[in-house]
Amino acid sequence: MDYWSVKRKIKIPKLGFGTWQIKGTQCVKAVKKALEVGYRHIDTAQIYENEAEVGAGILASEVPREEIFLVTKVWKDFLEFREVLLSVSRSLDNLKTDFIDLLLIHWPNPQYPLEDTFSALKELVQTKKVKHIGVSNFTPSLLRKALKIHPSIICNQVEYHPFLDQSHLIRTLKKQKMCLTAYSPLARGEVFKNATLKSIAKKYKKTVSQVALRWLIDQENVIAIPKAKTLSHIASNFNIFDFQLNSEDKRKIKKLTQKNKRLVCPPWAPSF
């Protein structure tokens, strides 16, 4: 397993397991399987409506809680000071845990002052219910504003895959000693249709998803959280630590990126 770390104070597995759209018994089994094959970074969110199942999967795996880097997110409608505290209390109950390793603001919401939201997040850290704080779907300008309020943000989780150029944001995060966590790292299945990725996968005798994920985590401060529902895909996505892409193939993949190839753009998304 590869890790992202800053001065050894924070250590996050560079490959995590995403749980968006996985619910019920399937989610319990998927999380349990992910931990059994070696994942130690599990990502969920309040809005996914599967925190209870994620918690059950963690318990079923028998992997010690201290070995798991658990991430959840506060939904955009719960960013008022008291709502943050109440919603995170519910998350802790659902996840069956005493603490969250990384808590993210899921989407920025201009209706709520960031100062109030971060005051609540800071209180959660002080009471040891949360270890680290981050954001998700923040533009570089919003990120700079957030850092002025709370300089200890460690992560920005955003859409990132071989077809979306995030180089500017990655550079910004690197300067701030922060990581980028890539959601939708397989571009919602679009990677499987690409001839360049197919060719590179054939060369290394790997799958297209393994090549795309390897390309992402090879970047210094990038973490990837692929979602998979089938047990075989969960295991396959984790099997990326036994090969390296050469410089030429990395450049070929980099050429696929475009400035505005966004697949996730809900009505409340900020203007990137």
Image (spheres, helix red, strand yellow):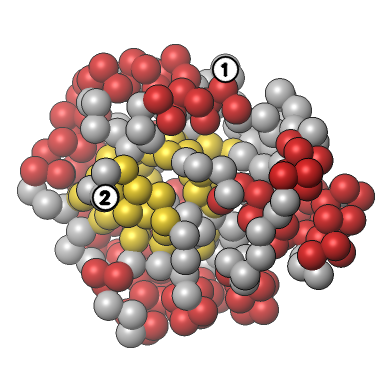
Q: Gap in Å between the C-alphas at discs 2 and 1?
A: 34 Å
Figure check: 151 above or below 135: above
Name the element at disc 1: loop
- The extreme left residue here reads 127
Residue depicted at 86% across the width and 64% down the height: 202
- Residue 92 lies in what quarter of the image? bottom left
| Residue behind mark 2 | 8
Amino acid at the residue labelled 1: Ser
Q: Is residue 103 left or right of residue 198?
A: left
Tell me: residue 192, above or below residue 33.
above
Point 24% across, 32% down: residue: 152
Q: What percent of the width, then of the height, locates residue 220?
A: 50, 42
Q: Can residue 17 be seen?
A: yes
Q: Are marks 2 and 1 in contact (CB under 8 Å)?
A: no
Measured from the top left, where is residue 272 in percent x and y? 58, 19
- Give the image quarter of residue 146: top left
User: Could you say where residue 264 lies in the image, as x and y percent from the top left?
Assistant: 64, 36
Label 2 sits on what residue type? Arg
Residue at image coords 57%, 17% = 271
Q: Nearer the viewer, mark 2 or mark 1?
A: 2
Q: Nearer the viewer, residue 135 or 152?
A: 152
The reply to whether residue 105 is in sight is no
Disc assigned to residue 271: 1
Left or right: 21 with respect to 175? right
- Along the line of sight, the residue nearer the viewer: 249 or 143: 249
Occupied quadrant, residue 234: bottom right
Quick check: 191 above or below 256?
below
